[in-house]
Image: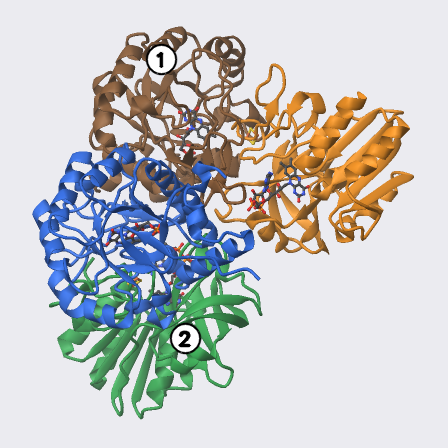
Chain colours: A orange, B green, C blue, D brown
Amino acid sequence: MGVYEARVISHQKLQESAYLLELHCPEIVEKAQAGQFVHLKCSETLAPLLRRPFSIHKTDAARGSLSIYYAVVGEGTDLLSKVSINEQLSVLGPLGKGFQLTKGKNVVVIGGGMGIAPMLFLAEELSKNDNKITILLGARDKEGLLVKDSFARFTNDLQLATDDGSLGHKGTVVELLKESLQDNPTMLYACGPLPMLKEVKRLSEKEGIPCQLSLEARMACGIGACLGCTCKGKGEKYYPKVCSDGPVFWAEEVDLSE
Amino acid sequence: MGVYEARVISHQKLQESAYLLELHCPEIVEKAQAGQFVHLKCSETLAPLLRRPFSIHKTDAARGSLSIYYAVVGEGTDLLSKVSINEQLSVLGPLGKGFQLTKGKNVVVIGGGMGIAPMLFLAEELSKNDNKITILLGARDKEGLLVKDSFARFTNDLQLATDDGSLGHKGTVVELLKESLQDNPTMLYACGPLPMLKEVKRLSEKEGIPCQLSLEARMACGIGACLGCTCKGKGEKYYPKVCSDGPVFWAEEVDLSE
Amino acid sequence: MSKAPDLSMEIAGLKLKNPVLVASGTFGFGMEYCDYFNPSVLGGIMTKGITLEPRPGNPPPRLCETPAGLLNSIGLENPGVDDFLASYLPVMKEKFSTAIIVNIAGSTVEQYAEVSSKLDGVEGIDALEVNISCPNVKEGGMAFGATAQSAAQVVAAIRNETSLPLIVKLSPNVTDIVEIAQAVVDAGADALSLINTLLGMAIDIEKEKPVLGNVFGGLSGPAVKPVAVRAVWQVSQSVDVPVIGMGGITGAEDALEFFMAGASAVAIGTGNFTDPLTAVKTLSGIEEYLTEKGYASIKELIGKAWKGS
Amino acid sequence: MSKAPDLSMEIAGLKLKNPVLVASGTFGFGMEYCDYFNPSVLGGIMTKGITLEPRPGNPPPRLCETPAGLLNSIGLENPGVDDFLASYLPVMKEKFSTAIIVNIAGSTVEQYAEVSSKLDGVEGIDALEVNISCPNVKEGGMAFGATAQSAAQVVAAIRNETSLPLIVKLSPNVTDIVEIAQAVVDAGADALSLINTLLGMAIDIEKEKPVLGNVFGGLSGPAVKPVAVRAVWQVSQSVDVPVIGMGGITGAEDALEFFMAGASAVAIGTGNFTDPLTAVKTLSGIEEYLTEKGYASIKELIGKAWKGS
Ligand SMILES: Cc1cc2nc3c(=O)[nH]c(=O)nc-3n(C[C@H](O)[C@H](O)[C@H](O)COP(=O)(O)OP(=O)(O)OC[C@H]3O[C@@H](n4cnc5c(N)ncnc54)[C@H](O)[C@@H]3O)c2cc1C
Ligand SMILES: Cc1cc2nc3c(=O)[nH]c(=O)nc-3n(C[C@H](O)[C@H](O)[C@H](O)COP(=O)(O)OP(=O)(O)OC[C@H]3O[C@@H](n4cnc5c(N)ncnc54)[C@H](O)[C@@H]3O)c2cc1C
Ligand SMILES: Cc1cc2nc3c(=O)[nH]c(=O)nc-3n(C[C@H](O)[C@H](O)[C@H](O)COP(=O)(O)O)c2cc1C
Ligand SMILES: Cc1cc2nc3c(=O)[nH]c(=O)nc-3n(C[C@H](O)[C@H](O)[C@H](O)COP(=O)(O)O)c2cc1C
Ligand code: FES
Ligand code: FES
């Protein structure tokens, strides 16, 4: 972990208001694990004041680069989208607790919306370990699934869902999951909007399948110092910190009610 | 006067941290008078919060454009310097009370440092009215006088001064003025740093020559509504507003002591 | 097809065509902004603070920009009530068909009373806004707003002199704003404005002295919005009179926060400086929001965040 | 060749190698930042607030970014004084060769006293910072800091239990911070920290309810700097003990404002989040400034803006 000035190597608009940003940062790449994130300063001014967390979408050891896949949703990501090649960005990372990898298992990877972002790195890592991987990606429309091809390399079973039916199954990724469960997976990995995570958690509990969820929370420090990015825990730990106890949690560790 | 979204037509780095920015804004050009200024939003975010005032350096009726000549001194001008061609900037203008023009007189135009900026537009206007014009420009070094050639068109008597002697007289523009006074000018026009303005005012009073000074103050509204940009007045008016009672004042109207 | 949402609002008997005003001291007497838009489209104009005698204001510099904020130490520069009535009000009356709310200040209770009595019954004045919270003059503002007792005293004295709707403007520079709010309502306030500026200052590290000629200034702008929203939330739940919310509004989203926190109207201050069209844009943004969400009236939003759905 | 300027400072008998600290609650117990720099280069570390019993803190969401500011409602989540002594302090002692200032809070005067007595005489603790100004918990903070009397009462009770240097942290959410400062100094404070956060809130206009789980939060960051500088200016001129200034510092220029306003040391809070290196950069920036301007010691700058040259 450290703070680095990372040079922008490539920056590509993928779909309406979603971008792929590649940063040169070998120090982070060397240590990064799937499910971890980086904390980025999106501007040099005080607007916005805080950094913004983004999952590591993929790494390229040869280029010493990591990529993030992000959507423009507000001021920070809007400013980020205007950053040019060769500009430097201040990056903290790699941060947080990533996914626990499995070996020789039958796993399902579920990504919904921008929750697709961390799943590519995860898929790559899982594919190295002799797992049987099913990947389920969902989005509003086919535009939201433009990164699907990068996933195809890591699985023979890539299933897509869109709300408007413009690509793959018309409906939610949770519906795809329900079918996949008949295949008796032994591990679920999920990242996506809260309603999706709630459903995945419910299904995993019902079926008794271990399940790892990547959560989001508003962050300040990003490194466990401010105690700001809490979610609701279960059992002893009242309020786990998403940035350092997570972002990846076992489904049973967290309470997703609002 | 109005608020306009003006497109950047050209943007040129002139010298170390000084730029020439040309904005397409026919509405302002049509009404602009020498000595007036525009109030520019340098960023789309809240950093910095306020607009920044800049003198109108020149106008080009055919292109419907106005130019400002500015130095990077802080956050706002730094952001401004990064603006690209075809971007839009929000501009208020033309604002303030400009220079009172003369006809058939023997005038001296004195610009020091970035105070050179409004003097080009002034020189052009004066040159239309059958005046005998002496132009005195001063700067730290010759880099600071790169705009000098634009002035040459409007006078046969362009004199330069630099602190380091790298161009023209080694010394201040006030020293040049002292010599020019032997020529019995009938009007002085000055813009520049406070110590220079104080000297010009003192000399004008000593010699009894009418003198117009362009002043600066921190501004908020730029249009006379907030009462924030005051200077010290003389006589009845305690605190004239630089944005609407000025920026150009008769030397005797203002008290330049700090 | 959906009907246009109802934006009208009544505050202290004063009918506003819409609930977007411009805040005292940031809009002069309205004239300066006429080149940019027609102020009559707004719900009302709150004038620069008026005192009994003309005041020159504080020595320059009077402004200092801060992160997302502005420090000002204007110090109530104004032409005085007589000249206001003679020279400014007639022009305002003629030019503007919107509520004219005259902001007043004073150094003594008597001065507040006298200004109020001079403004009472004058045609064209729709309401008074009493500034007991100006941090920029030693007497005549903050001192009165600092305790419930002195605040109530000023308000009672004014109430005695006028039947105009009385809006009292509160300071955030107090330990318990609710206590002061209740005291001035008991003393006769028909509505409350909040917040005035926060007491602040800045130092010029080159000159090694305060930036402002007056040392202290009032902090306004987006930086103070969280304090303002909190004050509106607290006060609107504790009094029975309407609250006009202000502090850092730069657009409709900010304004909506204030309504949901309990404001019945909002005023744009520093936001006018960033963009002279902020008030009109805020107004149209609110209208769009209501239409989009299917609200029939802005009134449905008042206090929504504490009333619940 | 010029000598390196003297950055050392003594506050309440506590010798600091330099006057740049990190503020309570923004630096955990120092461990998290070790990956970014060595905290031992700083003048000291102010710990997260410690209470008698462990506390879970407030429900999420606990953070909301605002223009140039941050609202937090952590609510004093902490392991409690016993676990702090058993598990955290030993690691801090071992890892850090810099002043360790333990920030404490409580819900009753007795709790403050008991925590202080447990920390008294413990090796490795250099000073206590007493938080009587936390706006984030109903009891145990702000309530005590709100009046001179209750503030003095807490401080006197703590003074009774400990001979450690006692730094009392004041709230800006009061009508008269000077009055409170004087009262706590009279009650035994050796130094003052100011400011804690401003009470604020934000509303989520989509959800039509407050953003923070706890409704209210404390506002920090550059947005509040003008309020903090003002408080330091006022208080440092009215008491005879040193003042530690904080509120919105993001670099040396901000820190210099605080020194010139009267601070003897500064602390970086929210600035750590923008850049974990803010504190070290501030320190080196101060050193450069002193060298450039030919000051022999940082002490020459304390209160320069009111003392004059
Ligand atoms: C561990 C982690 C990993 C993330 N990875 C990615 C990623 O790979 N790609 C990606 O596009 N985004 C990712 N995000 C979300 C991303 O951080 C936010 O979209 C970003 O911070 C928004 O910044 P902004 O300034 O553009 O929007 P803001 O102006 O801050 O917010 C815009 C709107 O989005 C909402 N919002 C923004 N962020 C969050 C959040 N974290 N939780 C709830 N609501 C929010 C706000 O409430 C607001 O309505 C991740 C978040 C976390 C915590
Ligand atoms: C009527 C008028 C016309 C102007 N015309 C020009 C012009 O043609 N070209 C040009 O380069 N500049 C001009 N200026 C100055 C210009 O407005 C400032 O340089 C600019 O606002 C600085 O913004 P910033 O954000 O970069 O600097 P900031 O970060 O705001 O300030 C940087 C430093 O400069 C000082 N400073 C900035 N502006 C002023 C000021 N107005 N008075 C005193 N100190 C100041 C600040 O105190 C600070 O130390 C003009 C100013 C006025 C009032
Ligand atoms: C330059 C300036 C002048 C002001 N003058 C007055 C005044 O005369 N009377 C008053 O009651 N408030 C005055 N205010 C306070 C504003 O009306 C408003 O309450 C405050 O600025 C908060 O709103 P804002 O953040 O939108 O500016 C002034 C504010 C500014 C910035
Ligand atoms: C996330 C967070 C947690 C804080 N926790 C504490 C605390 O436990 N005790 C305390 O006295 N102050 C606490 N504070 C206040 C800071 O120590 C500091 O006084 C305040 O934030 C102003 O400084 P800043 O603007 O540099 O952050 C906290 C501030 C933040 C932002
Ligand atoms: S963001 Fe600070 S603890 Fe997680
Ligand atoms: S800047 Fe507002 S009156 Fe001049």
Q: Secondary structure at mark 2?
A: loop
Query: Which of the chains bears the disc numbered 1?
Result: D
Residue in the foreground of this view, choosing between D260 and C157: C157
The percent position of residue C26, horizontal first and vertical second, equals 30, 58
User: In x, y percent, where is residue D182?
Assistant: 21, 25
Please tell me whether residue B195 is drawn above or below residue D162 in the rendered image: below
Which numbered tag is attached to residue D112?
Answer: 1
User: Is residue D33 visible to the viewer in this orientation of the structure?
Assistant: yes
- Quadrant hosting residue A57: top right
| Quadrant of res C100 | bottom left
Q: Is residue B71 found left or right of D31 in the rendered image? A: left
Identify which amino acid the numbered label 2 is placed on. His
Residue C109: x and y, percent?
10, 45
Front-lying residue, C72 or C285: C285
Q: Amino acid at mark 1?
A: Tyr
Question: On the rendered image, what quadrant is the C terminus of chain D found in?
Answer: top left
Q: Closer to the camera, C19 or D189? A: C19
Residue in the image at 75% along x and 33% along y? A190
Q: Give the residue displayed 35% in from the left and 41% down from the top.
A: C232
Residue at label 2? B57
Element assignment for label 1: helix
Nearer the camera: disc 2 or disc 1: 1
Q: Is mark 2 within 8 Å of ligand 2?
A: yes
Q: Residues within 10 Å of mark 1 (few under 14, many from 20)?
A: many
Image point (32%, 35%), residue name:
C238
> Where residue A74 is drawn, which disc sits there?
none
Question: Disc 2 is attached to a residue of which chain?
Answer: B
Residue A161, x across and y down, in percent: 80, 44
Do callouts 2 and 1 point to residues on the same chain?
A: no
- The vertical placement of B135 against C268, above or below, is below
